[in-house]
Amino acid sequence: MNSPVPFMRMIWLASVLLFTVIGIGLAQNEISGKVTDAASQQPMPYVNVYLPEYHKGMQTDGAGKFEIKNISGGKVLVQFSHVGYKTISKLVSDEHEKNNLLVEMQPAFITTEEVVVSGGTYSTQHQNAMKIDLLKSRDIEQAGTPSFMDALARMPGVDLISKGPGVAKPVIRGLSMTNVLMLNNGVKMENFQFSENHPFLVDEFGTDRVEIIKGPASLLYGSDAVGGVINVVKEKPAPVGKIVGDYHIQYHSNTRGVVSNLGLKGSTDHFYWGLRGGLKSHADYRDGNNQYVPNSRFNEYSVKATAGWNNSLGLFRLYYDLNRPKIGMTVGDVIPLIHENGRENKYWYQDLTNHLFSSRNTLFIKKYKVDVNAAYQMNNRKLQTDNGKPVFEMVDMDLSTFSYEVKTYFPTMSTSEYILGIQGANKTNRNHEAPNHVLPDADVNDFSFFGLAQSTFFDKLKLQTGLRYDYRHISTEAEQNKDAVKNNYGNVSASFGATYDFSGKVLLRANVASAYRTPNIAELTENGLHGVRYEQGNTDLKSQRSYEMDMSFHWHTPGFMFDVSGFSNHINRYIFIAPTDATTTEGFKIYRYTQSDTHLYGGEVAVDVLPVHWLAINTNYSMVIGKQNSGGYLPFIPQNKLRTELRFQKHQLGVLHQAFFCVGSLLAAEQKHPALFETPTDGYFLLHAGVGTEIKWANQMIALSVRGNNLLNRAYVDHLSTLKDLGYDNMGRNISFSIRIPFGIN
């Protein structure tokens, strides 16, 4: 099949050449200073000083001093962080070749403002007109869950559609599948995520944090970001002049699971590198009745490599990620074949391979900044069945994706920022010898351009507005039971947001956005058995169009934080799959993709209280309702959930550092409003607890933690579990043990 991708690649290459040729005459500045404790005025060693845009940083010395050289002109964001202290961000201008900063660190147990990158620029959470939540790597580690995706569900407004711990898809405010975009370090993941049975192929190894945008983000990321964005941000490079590493191992009692990873990275003034590898192996999980769920086992290994070069022209970074999971599928055909609780994948499992190569570069051209990014993904999906089938390997598909992006940040005054950009992608799906072609051979070509403007008035009011146009061409080949499709889609997305900072502690944010999503290949062409359902596509599907308004209020003091947000999302022609009255000749019920005008609404509330410096009380509540305008409810709408946690913490307790003990609960309400092919789900109550500390050994801080989830060993089922129809409950009691050992040399 021929595609117009060469023309798009020519645009990308021409942009690279244009911006490279004019990159002359760059300034070279340096940033230095001293960091002290605000209360004692004593110098603070080992404070992390980091420049997010430059991927460069160091730690303060014994006198609290630092010096970072070879910084190009323009505005530079500098971040100061230390465990147990409030993160401080300072914006340094290019008025002086040498900038000397005096920074005072203040203790803080309640985190209220961190630097984020998913909103289009490097900015703090308060400075961004879009509300962006954070989940740090330490929170993921201490969650004690067998899979990375399970840890994300700790965030209010985020849930999971799951078929056991190995197969989980995120849900943001009731939207899922291709309505939610997963980014791996800014690169859109492409790995057959159209179904609840196909997980995103990304893991927690080498992750610094996860940033979550709840609500339409199509302006920056395109069609599939209509429901929200989850951006997995890679770990920071090593401090300049050091080689550091870490080894982390976890054990999970429920699945007899072992998770381990080893990383090593180094950095000089101009060059940095990193290597990391990880392994996961889990047996079938057990429910609250101590019954194992057959074939819920999963195994995975991953490899990651990073290299970066900083010089007067800019920053040049290369990344490689390999994820190689084998995920057991708990389906009707496999149940008679599983006779013991094991971990080896023998029957009915997804055999997946995902390679991701990405190049992410920033050019500094006088006062301009230009991002030039490209990525290539190769994803292979195989479905292995059993020896009783005519063919053991039922599915074998390759999805190859080349994507590119050029963004220009224009010279601005201190109160304004302007961005123009182009993005594009070429996707090809090809089937091999396996007989079941879930998707036909197909080509998808995307091209878009967008603009974003941000301005600050009175030092308190920040406005953000933008406009985007997307074009998509889909072309598929005809097969025995699938007609050929050749469709073009084009549409506009727009947003307007405002943030008013009353006092640095009280913040009001509002956004109005209109976004759209085109139907994907599965929704247009599917016609066959997929899992336990016979699914039919619909070539008459039109693009979705959403109109969302959301508002949030934030208030924090040193010992208190209150955050409330609400949203209303009207989606015209919402695409979902629903059962019909028809069946196949073999007796399988036919499900068909359809469209309906819908309304989703709800919100989240979070309260953090610090009555004394060693006790933190965290509470959050989330709810969402999804209805069709013509009557009936939408599928995969999560239960309303209340989470609470008490956390006792001390910076130092004898030989123990950062010691903590936590106990908390999750209360899920009954889901009384299921969709057509769903049934009501009872509410449930879960209890968890954890304890951990860091111990100094040979000048390194070894982190130890133990976490128990579902401590009461409740037998329960979540409304979004796709194992519910087979009569299997969610996971029972799980005790996880974790050890993280850092090491390093100068």
Image (spheres, helix red, strand yellow):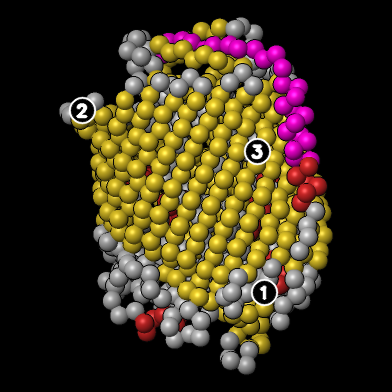
732 above or below 180? below
> Residue drawn at (81%, 47%), measured in percent from left and top?
7
Give the spatial CA distance, label 2 vs label 1: 59 Å
Of residue 321 and residue 96, the one placed in the foreground of this image is: 321
Give the spatial CA distance, label 3 vs label 1: 33 Å
Q: Nearer the viewer, mark 3 or mark 1?
A: 3
Give the spatial CA distance, label 2 vs label 3: 41 Å
**Residue 698's mark?**
2
First reached walking from the N terminus: tag 2 or tag 1: 1
Quadrant location of the C terminus?
top left
398 above or below 224? below
Image coordinates for residue 133, horizontal then vertical, percent: 53, 41
Q: Disc 2, disc 1: CB below 8 Å?
A: no
Does dot 2 land on a helix, a strand or a loop? Answer: loop
30 inside magenta stretch: yes
Of residue 614 and residue 241, the one placed in the foreground of this image is: 241
Q: Amino acid at mark 2?
A: Ala
Image coordinates for residue 156, horizontal then vertical, percent: 49, 49
Q: Amino acid at mark 3?
A: Asn
Image coordinates for residue 180, horizontal then vertical, percent: 61, 54
| Quadrant assignment, res 116 | top right
First reached walking from the N terminus: tag 3 or tag 1: 3
Image coordinates for residue 43, horizontal then vertical, percent: 35, 11
**Residue 373's mark?**
3
> Residue drawn at (40%, 20%), measured in percent from left and top?
241
Q: Amino acid at mark 1?
A: Glu
The magenta segment: 11-35
**Residue 526's mark?**
1
Does dot 3 land on a helix, a strand or a loop? Answer: strand
Specify whether residue 387 is in view: yes
